Amino acid sequence: AKRKRRSHIGLSRYPMMTAHHLAFTRFIVETRVRVTTKTGGASSSFAPNARRYRRDTTCSHTRADGNASALRLDIKTTTTKKKNVSTSASSSSSSSSGTGAVKFTNNSENAPPTPPPAPSRGNAIVVGAGPAGALTAMSLARAGFQVDVFERRGPSSRLPSQGLVNTGVASSRTYNIVLNQRGVAALKSHGVDVDSYGVKLAGSVRHEQGEFKRPLRNPFFLFDLKKRAKIGNVTSRSTNAFNGSISINRSVLAAEIQKAAIERYPTQITFHYNKQILEVPGGTSIDLKSRKVVFERFEGEDTCPYLSEDEDPNETRRYDLLVGADGVNSEVRRAMEIFHDPKFTVKKHVDGMQYKSVTLPVIGGWIGEEAAEKWKRSFHTWPRGLNSLLAPPNPDGTLSGVVILPSLAISKNAKWSWDTITAPQEVQKMFTELFPNAFAGMLPPQISASLANQKPANGGTTIFCSHLAIPESNVVLVGDAAHSVWPSLGQGANVALESAVCLGTALEEVEDTKEAIETFDKVRKPQTDACGRLSMAGFGGSTNRTASSFWFVLKISTLMILSKLIPVSKVPIIGFAPPAIFNLGSPDYTYDEIERTMRMEVFRLSLMGFFFLILLALSFYYGGMKPLLKKSLGWLSLRFFGA
């Protein structure tokens, strides 16, 4: 598949398909298809036992023009059980209609996924039934696997599926995530619609304390300023940031994906709750050589049923494919480290921030009915330097908040830290000083007591694995187990869901399981690594958070101004496009392309700064701009006209 020609300052756009499908299509065409060119056209040769097949995949996303459309990717290719297959390929613009053509067609209807094939590729075990694990199970079932999903906690369906009942007391397990177009497209590729269970965001509300003196703290205000409301010393500003994204509780999302998996693949997918991998001190109960896993009952939940006298608490399962979707502290990943050291290595970057969860009441009653309704569907933020309160909305208008404070490990002199706040009175004092309008000026005693007693959760861990899969062991990682990222840019759930779909795409396109997960590793790892690096660099993702945040936002603000003054649409060669980081939520852009474009943006800004300093120095040397201009014109006249 040929890309559109792109300039050195722009990104390639793929309006007919999502980026993860394109990446796999491009990789498979480049590595598995041999083009034989002859006089007058192209011809193809096939292996004697080659098997032809056609696959249709449908996914939905919002195009740049704002119109939602269902996009169908029709792939005609040739595959075989042998490793080397030769066939011909032609691009979508080619007039040839022979086998090997990659054809892109546009559908106006949001067609459901194609009917699932009969299980024929063996048994797959998925460890973890979170959003990534449940969606991975659907991808494997569609690729022809019999799937068993093991989850250490009880059934997610026991949680409310129509929205949470908010009492103000929350835990780190019940927090909201924000799905952008990238995550929504991954869900819709399997027919999972979460619009009715989440909140489609109308924008964001930023609650600034004191006067609005530093616009660079949020570049969205430069061009998207909509409303202002002030109460006391807090000024609240409404913007279009996050517009169109979906806020949904993580547990509700997992429950809905599990429900869709059971309804669509009732004979292929089985969920086993209250089951975890048997803990072995200093070792693992996963045998990657014999492809066996030992599970035990997890009795840390009230939903765990009682064990009968004749029931064995442990069970051993064999697998043909093992998928680790068991989070940051993955047991599957640890087994890969044990069995494949030093080939398989893991690097972790732990954020020094800590957070606690709290449910906030409906706010904005003093700003008018129309604005208050928009506030109920907005992402609220209270930035206070190293301290912050982030609160996406729930369906009932309340907010699912997380109070983020630095640990003493990164800020020894921090005034507010969850390491030192242990009493309800200290929580009350902190809210009064930092977030006075969060609870209308009065923090309920039960909430302050809950926050004081709640164990703080780590702010985030970015994980870089040397491989996402070990083909010889038929084991692969997805989600946080493979590529956990800091939450600074809100990409964690979106990149996890996208990886689940990418794994299924690879298994559908490549018949041999070993080669399929090897393809997944080669194609997907550059994307997830780029996402991790972008998240660590985004909005102060370093120890020196304040300085990093300032320079990051300064760069984005400068690019926004230049894109307005010198738009690339009017000045193609030297013009500026909007900052590439704004395309993170779009499935039309891959993470590594965004990262490369951001590097080019930094280079161009540095080059502009360099020439500006030279101009300033010359102006100072010649006594001002006017003498410099006169001197320059005189030199040009002498150089080109001889006078």
Image (cartoon, rainbow, N blue to C red):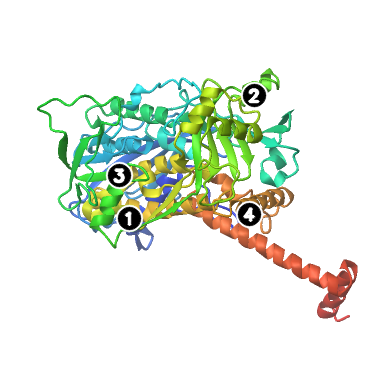
Give the amino acid type for the residue marked by disc 3 in the picture: Gly
Residue 574: % across, % down: 68, 58
**Eye-nearest disc, 2 or 1:** 2
Disc 3 from disc 2: Cα separation: 44 Å
Which of the marked residues, 2 or 4, is nearer the chain's N terminus? 2
- The quadrant holding residue 29 is bottom left
Do the CB atoms of the residues marked 3 and 2 lie less than 8 Å apart? Answer: no
The residue indicated by pointer 1 is 88
| SS assignment at label 2 | loop
Neighbour class for label 1 at 10 Å: few (<14), some, many (≥20)?
many
Tell me the distance, in whole angstroms, between the alpha carbons under discs 2 and 4: 32 Å
Mark 2 crowd level (few <14, some 14–19, many ≥20, 10 Å Cα): some
Identify which amino acid the numbered label 2 is placed on: Ala
Between the C-alphas of marks 2 and 1, the distance is 67 Å
Q: Nearer the viewer, mark 3 or mark 1?
A: 3
Q: How many angstroms separate mark 4 from mark 3 (CA)?
A: 37 Å
Q: Quadrant of residue 230?
A: top right
Q: Is residue 584 left or right of residue 498?
A: right
Q: Which residue matches tag 3?
A: 324
Q: Is any atom of residue 8 visible in this view? A: no
Residue 573, horizontal then vertical, whole percent: 66, 59
Q: Which residue is mark 4?
A: 547
**Position of residue 250 measured from the top left corner of the image (x, y, whole percent):** 43, 32
Residue 440 circle label? 2
Q: Secondary structure at mark 4?
A: helix
N-term mark: 3 or 2: 3
Q: Residues within 10 Å of mark 3 (few under 14, many from 20)?
A: many
Q: Residue furthest bottom?
A: 642
Which of pointers 1 and 4 lies earlier in the amino acid sequence?
1
366 lies left or right of 392: right
Asked if residue 634 is positioned above or below residue 357 in the image, the reply reads: below
Between marks 1 and 4 in the image, the one whose residue lies nearer the viewer: 4
